[in-house]
Image (spheres, grey):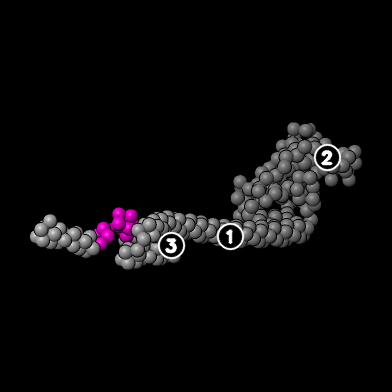
Amino acid sequence: MNIFTKNSLLIGIITSILVVGCGGPPQNNPLLTNAEQAYQKAEKDSMVVLKAPVALKEAEEALEQSQQIWKEKGDEDLVEHYAYIAQQKTKIAQETAKLNAAQDAVERAEAERKQVLLEARRADAIAAERRAENAMSQLEQERKEAERARKEASELADRLSEMEARQSERGMVLTLSDVLFDFDSSNLKSGANRVVSELANFLREYPDRTVQIEGFTDSVGSAEYNKDLSQRRADALQQALIQAGIAGNRIKTIGYGEEYPVATNMNEAGRQQNRRVEIIISDKNGVVSQRTE
């Protein structure tokens, strides 16, 4: 082998060594590249940054460790190991962010639900308070009405007592003897003016009351005549009240004649009791119970 050939061979060996020595490791590692891309995507996601900062920091640390080993041309297995860890930590950060966001949404919904319940309870409480106030107002109104009714009943009783009315099953009854009329006549005597005046004043004081005037006679004479006489006497008293200013529709008259005696007709004392006019005062609704006996 000549010198030229030897030199060429030497140059070739040296060139090969130089090429190998200057090339170094490959320019990138696919696993590390994927880990870097995944982290960059997560780092730009505001939800991940806000909701999973710790997990994202752990992914960053693992990625930096992989990058450092790569730069230092260290063990490729370690590069890929930490790149894998970084990639998994990034996924964990993303999932943690989703979980925390969902948990926050649940907490917000729960807070809103509690607020709605609180407002509903408050509304119920207000409604209940108003119902209680209305009930109290109603009770107070009823109490006042009862007090007015009691007072009115007391005043009515006193007024009727002054008129010498008596209580009966049909209500208060004012009995007038036949001394208000001439014998065998339906003409009112002058002494009846006081009774008419008192009765008219009473009806003016209690405009919701009406009266029913019932005429009665003894058994002397025919039943037909007595019935007519009792009716005329009741009508005479009605006309006197109308002249005193009482509306005619508040005064009803009935002539019973010799029916419903209150004493015997066998003597004058009994017959005098049977010759009478009864005035029945209505209830507060203007109703007079009908006679049954």
Residue underneath mark 3 = 55
Task: Please check the rendered image and state whether residue 272 is part of the magenta-colored stretch, yes or no.
Answer: no
**Span shown in magenta:** 24-36
Residue toward you, 115 or 129: 115
Residue 201: image location, x then y, percent:
67, 58
Residue situated furthest front in the rendering: 1
The answer to whether 13 appears left or right of 54 in the picture is left
Q: Mark 2 vs mark 1: give the one in front.
A: 1
Residue underneath mark 2 = 261
Residue 250: image location, x then y, percent:
63, 48
Residue toward you, 46 or 258: 46
Quadrant location of residue 134?
bottom right
Q: Mark 2 vs mark 3: give the one in front.
A: 3
The answer to whether 111 appears left or right of 90 in the picture is right
Residue underneath mark 1 = 125
Task: Give amino acid for label 3.
Answer: Ala
